[in-house]
Image (tube, rainbow, N blue to C red):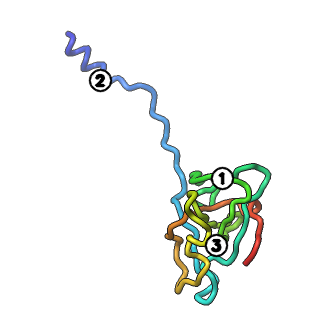
Amino acid sequence: MIAALLLSLGTVSGPPAPEAESFPEPRAPMIGLDGPSLDACGGLGRVGGMYRKQVIRDAPEEGARTSDTLEQSTLVWLCEAEGDWQGVVYASGEFQEPGDCRVSSPVAEPRAYDGPCRAGWVLAKDVEFLAG
């Protein structure tokens, strides 16, 4: 009797599990799009916008995962742009400087950024262009 009860309990299903949230595939910004004679990322900018921190996403879409947040005034390299999104490369950690990111020199061919710094996507309206 107890065995039959336990067996029947094992077949009872509860409410359905919530659907797993779906995110766009992560995509690093491309570098070297301006050609082999120009810097890998064509400009330098500063994070701005109306909030103290800006969200960095891992793809150029509103529904992409948040990969980081940056304080206002953080310096970022401006790489690929797509629609309303700006691909950025930035130093992370207290012992890294923007010059450590290896994007201020030319690269032979365009490629996804895979250097020592962090990279992601921010709304272009939240980045102030400084130089490039």
Q: Which of the two discs, 1 and 2, sits closer to the camera?
A: 1
Residue 110, position as x, y percentages in the image: 55, 80
Q: Which residue is mark 2?
A: 10
Bin the neighbour count of mark 2 within 10 Å (Cα to Cα): few under 14, some 14-19, many 20 and up: few
Instruction: Name which residue lies at 76% across and 71% down.
Output: 130
What amino acid type is highlighted by mark number 2?
Answer: Gly
Under circle 3, the secondary element is strand
Q: Is 103 placed left or right of 19 in the picture?
A: right
Residue 132, placed above or below residue 58: below
Residue 22, placed above or below residue 78: above
Instruction: Name which residue lies at 24% across and 20% down.
Output: 7
Residue 132, position as x, y percentages in the image: 72, 78
Q: Which residue is mark 1?
A: 55
Instruction: Name which residue lies at 21% across and 11% down.
Output: 2
Give how far apart the Cα atoms at labels 1 and 2 are: 45 Å
Residue 107, position as x, y percentages in the image: 54, 83
Label whose residue precedes the other's in the sequence (3 or 1): 1
Q: Which residue is mark 3?
A: 79
Label whose residue precedes the other's in the sequence (1 or 2): 2
Q: Nearer the viewer, residue 46 or 4?
A: 46
Instruction: Name which residue lies at 50% across and 70% down.
Output: 115
Bin the neighbour count of mark 3 within 10 Å (Cα to Cα): few under 14, some 14-19, many 20 and up: many
Give how far apart the Cα atoms at labels 2 and 3 are: 55 Å
Q: Residue furthest right?
A: 50
